[in-house]
């Protein structure tokens, strides 16, 4: 913990005087138009619910990559796979992995990382903060200016949320039997402060570093067929 506190302090010092970050993290034009502020708000908490597959991790990696700076991956059983994260634009050089021993330490590390102005995104895996802890994490995010991502498997009864947004991410297989193709997701915006629930089918085009809505993907297929 002492070493981690010192690391955060060094990041805070190195972040002094840097340019201001944009107010929101862009996803794709269609989704940005539906989100207040034109993208995913910074200085806020966001919940990502998963069915247990890797699609939610891919979506979280994309958000962390687009946050623009140093990111924290906090999990009692960390399992970040650098080549997989790099596919979503997140190089290992920007990643700090913390492995707390228990729930209390996980919340402490998350709060300290969110308070650091040189940290652009913090991912907390598989923990469920209570209302008091959520308020502390939100205040920490407002102080540091980054995004806090709370990723966990979904339950039947999620109940109310203090997070700014709540997402549910489902993956779909793409390509042929021998070529899985680009990741395809169903992104459900279950809750959005000052917004309304919506859902999108999107494909992540790694070569373009872009989220492409399903309608655009369908339009691309005939053009590809003609080129072949």
Image (cartoon, rainbow, N blue to C red):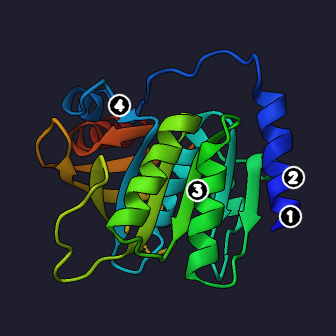
What's the CA distance linking mark 4 and mark 1?
A: 35 Å
Disc 2 to disc 1: CB gap under 8 Å: yes
Give the residue at x 33% y 34%: 223
Whether the residues at callouts 3 and 4 have beta carbons within 8 Å, the answer is no
Q: Which residue is mark 4?
A: 39
Label 4 SS = loop
Residue at the disc numbered 2: 6
Q: Which numbered dot is residue 74?
A: none
Q: Earlier in the sequence, mark 3 or mark 4?
A: 4
Which residue is the site of mark 1?
Answer: 2
Q: How far apart are labels 4 and 2 at the CA level?
A: 32 Å
Question: Residue 41: which quarter of the image?
Answer: top left
Between tags 3 and 4, which lies in front? 3
Residue annotated with mark 3 = 111
In the image, which is nearer the foreground, mark 4 or mark 2?
A: 2
Distance between the Cα atoms at labels 2 and 3?
15 Å
SS for callout 3: helix
Can residue 88 be seen in the rendering of this structure?
Answer: no
Instruction: Give the Cα distance between marks 3 and 4.
Output: 23 Å
Q: Residue at x 11, y 42 (%)?
A: 196
**Camera-side mark, 4 or 1:** 1
Secondary structure beneath dot 2 equals helix
């Amino acid at each position: 913990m002492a070493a981690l506190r010192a690391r955060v302090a060094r990041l805070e010092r190195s972040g002094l005087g840097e340019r201001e970050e944009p107010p929101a993290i862009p996803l794709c034009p269609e989704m940005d138009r539906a989100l207040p502020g034109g993208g995913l708000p910074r200085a806020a908490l966001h919940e990502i619910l998963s069915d247990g597959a890797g699609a939610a991790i891919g979506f979280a990696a994309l958000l962390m990559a687009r946050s623009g700076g140093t990111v924290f991956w906090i999990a009692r059983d960390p399992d970040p796979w650098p080549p997989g994260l790099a596919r979503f634009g997140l190089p290992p050089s920007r990643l700090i992995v913390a492995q707390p021993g228990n729930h209390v330490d996980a919340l402490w590390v998350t709060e300290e990382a969110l308070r650091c102005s040189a940290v652009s995104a913090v991912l907390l895996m598989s923990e469920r903060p209570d209302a008091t802890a959520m308020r502390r994490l939100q205040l920490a995010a407002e102080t540091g200016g980054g995004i806090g991502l709370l990723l966990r498997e979904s339950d039947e009864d999620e109940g109310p949320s203090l997070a700014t947004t709540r997402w549910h991410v489902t993956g779909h297989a793409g390509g042929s039997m021998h070529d899985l193709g680009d990741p395809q997701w169903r992104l459900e915006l279950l809750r959005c402060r000052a917004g309304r629930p919506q859902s999108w089918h999107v494909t992540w085009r790694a070569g373009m570093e872009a989220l492409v809505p399903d309608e655009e993907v369908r339009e691309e297929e005939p053009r590809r067929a003609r080129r072949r």
